[in-house]
Amino acid sequence: MKNSDLTSVANDPDLATAAKRGKLKRLIAEWPQLGIVAALIVTVLVFTAIDPAFFSGYNFINIFLQSSVTAILAMAEAIVIITAGIDLSIGSAVALTAVVVGLLLKAGYPIPIAMFGSLLAGATAGLLNGIIITTTRITPFVVTLGTMSIFSGLALIISNGQTVYGLPPHFSDLLAGSIGRLPIPVVIALCVLAITWVVIRTTKLGEYLIAIGGAREVARLAGIRVALYTAAAYVISSALASVAAMITVARLSAADPIIGSDLLLPAVAAAVMGGADLMGGEGSMLGAVIGALLIATLQAGLTFLNVQAFYQQVAIGLVIILALLFNRLQKSRA
């Protein structure tokens, strides 16, 4: 822009306002997670203003720890949502794979074998979802609603409806300990974030998943094996559910067959708040993690203020809806 143009913009309020709006739109386009980041910052500031003791290193480490499982599941959901799908069975997959690792550990199998068995069970569950969705053309919502019930039932059947206790303490040390002051579940969540970000943003797999979600028929005509890569998304999703399950089992030193019943909603909400478009073609691994952090911060803040759990559910639900509305408004203005 020439000096004369800059002078005219500076002297004309309308042009200056238009220039500012243009910069804001460019910022929103470059940072689609701006709204969720702003919501997280505001939430922290509000709780800190109410009680300054909330703003402490110990409390933030606890928030990171509490959000680690939700963050992993949110990234799993984001991968599926990118393909214009959804995985309602993810919480039940957590329960099933938690019971698998618990039973294998209790039976005396080495920790690596038990972990591999849990991952294999998760990947198999995801493969079942993918095969049914791609071969029957039934919508992912309906298919995973059905497998949600199947996986929950299997978890109860193989555990006889009982929580599995008597797990080796080394398993908890491995997945629920800490490195210095940083909890291992947080380290695992950060590793998952790094890996999934690289996969979605820099590999052919990520490129194909985005293409499938954006325009499935166009992707097929372009030579992309739509069924294969769609199924792969569900395999990855359920494998990550197994990772979340093992962390949860390690933290509790027990495998509960109903352990994942309350994990579905936070996972989907965090993924969508973080920028995943339910229509497909868009999704952010970092945004999913920030969404999980927002939910964990809300829960921690309300607990810190001694708000009853019933009211917490209402408050968190309202904030999720407001954050999603803000994201929708942000996209419409971008």
Image (cartoon, rainbow, N blue to C red):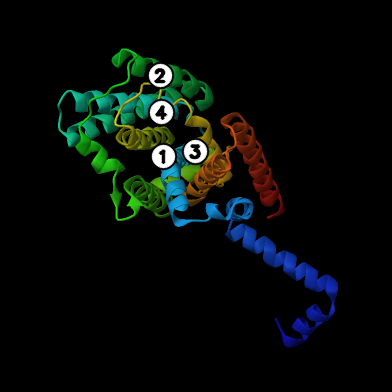
- Percent across and percent down for residue 207 are 44, 48
**Mark 2 or 1, nearer chain start:** 1
**Label 2 vs label 3: CA separation?**
25 Å
- Percent across and percent down for residue 36 are 59, 50
Circle on res. 152: 2
Of 100 and 14, nearer the camera is 100
**Label 1 vs label 4: CA separation?**
23 Å
Left or right placement of residue 92 versus residue 303 in this view: left
Quadrant of the image containing the N terminus: bottom right
Q: Single out the mark in the foreground, 1 or 4.
A: 1
Q: In the image, is residue 319 above or below residue 258?
A: below
Question: Element type at marker 2?
Answer: helix
Circle on res. 130: 4
Residue type, mark 3 in image: Thr
**Mark 4 or 3, nearer chain start:** 3
Q: In the image, is residue 329 above or below residue 23?
A: above
**Mark 1 or 4, nearer chain start:** 1
- Quarter where residue 92 is shown: top left
- Percent across and percent down for residue 226 are 44, 36
**Label 1 vs label 3: CA separation?**
22 Å
Residue type, mark 4 in image: Gly
Q: Single out the mark in the foreground, 2 or 1.
A: 1
**Label 2 vs label 1: CA separation?**
19 Å
Question: Element type at marker 1?
Answer: helix
Residue type, mark 1 in image: Val
Q: In this figure, which residue is indicated by the disc labeled 1?
A: 69
